[in-house]
């Protein structure tokens, strides 16, 4: 059995088809990953502020916020880059309201390593859209966060990625299935370079488009795995919730 097929089976090893919302561990080329999945129609949202307008920043505060509505967090993850005040870098849309504008210019750092892109949540499903394509199409996203670089673009890796790169970090990102009905949120559990991280989305999860969220500060909250990563307060957070009890 090849390493790729062994990794694919590890990702799907849930006794059949993986349940949406389930988080599971996988290994690809000897690097451990955790994958969490959401399906169209489930309550997947982006979160930044609480009801009083104060930044959430932590999984604990997010859990308290959704508990007010009788809900619980299935999983949550940091979802895009942010300034020192934790406000989003680039586009941020929450419940249809644009809180931060789209940035189309190249720039420093990973965010500016164009092509970058936008993760879009719509009532009918999900999309990862390259930034220029997003500007041209102006899709109606209920929630959206811009980040960069793109990891996979129409089935191809970002052209700037190098297989032998020594830049290795804990990294996280999102990929969307070809039909747009499933979104996969991935965090590496060991340092990995961009090339290997992108190939996990392309070759294991088979997502034609995937977007990098961040590295080094990447964190996951997955109660079913008894996992709650700690660290400095975050900016945007993506979370899937379900009714409590």
Image (cartoon, rainbow, N blue to C red):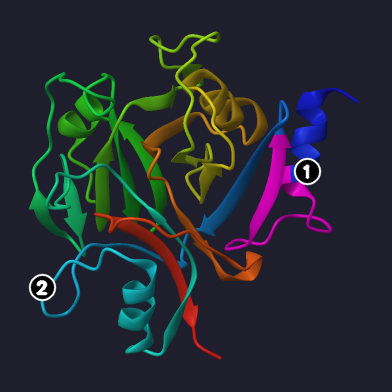
Q: Which mark is residue 200?
A: none
Please give left or right for residue 10 compared with residue 181 in the image. Answer: right
Please give left or right for residue 167 compared with residue 80 in the image. Answer: right
- Other-residue count near label 2 (Cα within 10 Å), few / some / many at <14 / 14–19 / ≥20: few
Q: Position of residue 225 (x, y in %)?
A: 64, 64
Q: How far is disc 2 from disc 1 in space, using C-alphas?
A: 41 Å
Query: For this rendering, which residue is in front, 179 or 72?
Result: 72
Is residue 156 covered in magenta?
no
Q: Position of residue 9 (x, y in %)?
A: 80, 41
Identify the residue at image location x=57%, y=70%.
223
Count of numbered labels shown in the rendering? 2
Identify the residue at image location x=60%, y=30%.
200
Secondary structure type for disc 1: helix
| Disc 2: which residue | 53
| Disc 1: which residue | 10
Is residue 24 covered in magenta?
yes
Tell me the quarter of the image containing the N terminus: top right
Secondary structure type for disc 2: loop
Residue occupying the far front of the picture: 231
Identify the residue at image location x=41%, y=63%.
239
Q: Position of residue 74 (x, y in %)?
A: 52, 70
Identify the residue at image location x=34%, y=82%.
64
Q: Position of residue 130 (x, y in %)?
A: 29, 28
Magenta part of the protein: which range? 11-27
Seen in the picture, residue 100 relative to 23 is either above or below; the reply is above
Q: Quadrant of residue 147?
A: top left
Seen in the picture, residue 139 relative to 68 is either above or below; the reply is above
Q: Quadrant of residue 190?
A: top right
Please give left or right for residue 150 compared with residue 107 in the image. Answer: right
Q: Mark 2 or mark 1: which comes first in sequence?
A: 1
């Amino acid at each position: 059995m090849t390493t790729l097929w062994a990794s694919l089976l590890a990702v799907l090893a849930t006794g059949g088809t993986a349940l949406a919302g389930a988080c599971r561990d996988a290994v690809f080329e000897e690097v451990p990953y955790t994958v969490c999945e959401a399906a169209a129609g489930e309550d997947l949202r982006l979160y930044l502020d609480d009801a009083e307008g104060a930044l959430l920043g932590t999984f604990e505060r997010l859990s308290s916020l959704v508990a007010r509505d009788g809900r619980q967090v299935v999983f949550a993850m940091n979802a895009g880059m942010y300034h020192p005040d934790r406000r989003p870098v680039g586009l941020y849309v929450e419940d249809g309201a644009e809180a931060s504008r789209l940035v189309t210019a190249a720039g420093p750092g990973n965010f500016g390593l164009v092509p970058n892109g936008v993760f879009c949540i719509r009532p009918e499903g999900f999309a990862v859209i390259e930034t220029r394509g997003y500007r041209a199409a102006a899709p109606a996203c209920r929630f959206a966060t811009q980040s960069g670089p793109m990891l996979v673009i129409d089935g191809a890796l970002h052209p700037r990625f190098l297989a032998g790169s020594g830049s290795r970090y804990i990294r996280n990102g999102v990929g969307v299935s070809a039909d747009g009905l499933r979104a996969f949120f991935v965090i590496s559990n060991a340092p990995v370079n961009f090339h290997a991280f992108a190939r996990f989305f392309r070759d294991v999860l088979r997502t034609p488009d995937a977007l990098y969220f961040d590295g080094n500060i990447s964190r996951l909250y997955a109660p079913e795995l008894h996992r709650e990563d700690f660290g400095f307060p975050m900016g945007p957070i993506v979370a899937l919730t379900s009714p409590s009890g």
